[in-house]
Image (spheres, rainbow, N blue to C red):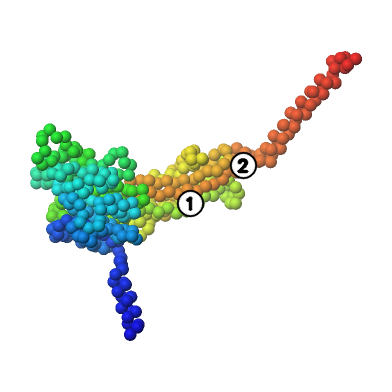
Amino acid sequence: MASCVWVFACLAALAGAVVRVGPHTLVIHESDDVLTSHTQFFAMLRAEGFVVSFARTDSDALDITNEDGPLYDNVILMCPAVEDFSGPMDPDDLVDFIDNGGNLLVIADGTIAHLYDNLTIELGHEFDLRGGAVLDPVQSLDGSPSSVTTSNFTVGAPILTAPLAQVAFPGVGLRRDPRNPRVLGIASASKTAYTKRTGAPASEHPFGVGTEILAVGALQALNGARAVLSGSLAMFSDALFAQQGLDNRQFVRDITTWAFQRRGLLRIGEATHARVDGAFGTPYTPGVGLEYTVVIDEYVGGVWVPFVADDVIVEIVRAGVIGSAAPLRHLGDGKFTTQLRLPATPGVLELRVEYRTPGYTSVVSSTRIVVHPGVDGHDREGPFARLAAAAAAYGGFIVAIAVGVGMLVTGPGARAKKE
């Protein structure tokens, strides 16, 4: 009987525990209507391996963190019209969620309320006010200016995985903060687009015009967390997924899986370096040739594969100042290599690779080396020969002075004066 009680206790503990079989994603929504209008979007998330949970904004139990940290890996906000949450969760908790490494997908529309205001500013973006809409009399569906579409995709890999024709994004305007280096536009409106608020006076300045209006924007936080923002709830809907001539399904899959860390992840291995002349174990000396190699991998399709790029460089840094830089040549197996010529003066140097490219996580490798005074390059005599030569020259100078002083003391003038 005691063993049965122990088994039941274990089962009860397991039932109360959070067991994750995949990245756990919470969808926060204000109405159950979205559960029927966006079924293909949610099915796509599950097909990609995400465990999807749902919570209404009026739920008293709504929360995304506890005393142990975040409860979810990803959060999707589909509640633009809500002013506040009913549960213990606070809008500022979403900023903390990003700060703790969580990923966020923020989706709005023309019903947007103030709940999103501070959040989007923290994410380096800004939505138009309630009642705002993006209009385009030229690039739209069925000639309706509010059914705006775009073909302006401002990024490629790793965010977008394939060429796209056009995407429909009817909804509210979005802008990014151009002063924030961590934000980027993924897709923008066409040059003929503009924004307008329902009931606004004709004299009101538009929130955005042309390509400054974003269909989708993104933030790459310093800690590696990601946020994607869109002003179009309809862009994720079953209706536009099924629309002929639109690439909404592929586009939404790409931006969502990138936001949730399925692509664009890099890792950098330990760097190696050696003398080009093959004199292993011999200290580095001024002017000697050095071969530098580092390995960088990319996370693709659930596995780590060799990264390929032509814009990776290594810098030679002395006392925090970059002395020189050289491009690294990739060998196709994740290895990046180059040959360097060490500077003509000895000292402590840093060989640094700092790769920061939009769409990828940042990676940094730093290796310290010591350049000794030695027999290579511009110092062929060697330290002891140089010391001996300097001492000999100094000694000769002293002897010459002594001889000169002796001549002055014992010369004819000195003898005549003595007599």
Residue topped by disc 1: 271
Residue sitting at 27 percent across and 40 percent down? 177
Residue topped by disc 2: 373
Label 1 sits on what residue type? Ala
Residue 64 in picture, x, y percent from top left = 27, 58
Label 2 sits on what residue type? Pro
Q: Is residue 112 left or right of residue 154?
A: left
Place residue 312 in its image quadrant.
top left
Say whether residue 146 is visible.
Answer: yes
How far apart, in angstroms, are the residues tagged by discs 1 and 2? 24 Å
Residue 144 in picture, x, y percent from top left = 9, 44
Figure check: 419 above or below 33: above
Say whether residue 247 is visible.
Answer: no
Figure check: 304 above or below 178: below
Residue sitting at 10 percent across and 34 percent down? 202
Residue sitting at 31 percent across and 68 percent down? 17
Describe the element under mark 2 as helix, strand or loop: loop
Q: Which mark is residue 365?
A: none
The tag earlier along the polypeptide, 1 or 2, is 1
Place residue 348 in its image quadrant.
top right
Place residue 386 in its image quadrant.
top right
Residue 33 in picture, x, y percent from top left = 13, 58
Describe the element under mark 1 as helix, strand or loop: loop
| Cβ–Cβ under 8 Å for marks 1 and 2 | no
Q: Is residue 351 left or right of residue 122?
A: right
Name the one closer to the observer, 26 or 263: 26
Q: Residue furthest bottom?
A: 1
- Sort mark 2 into few (<14), some (14-19) or many (20+) by Cα contacts within 10 Å: some
From the image, which quarter does the C terminus lie in? top right
Name the one closer to the observer, 28 or 328: 28
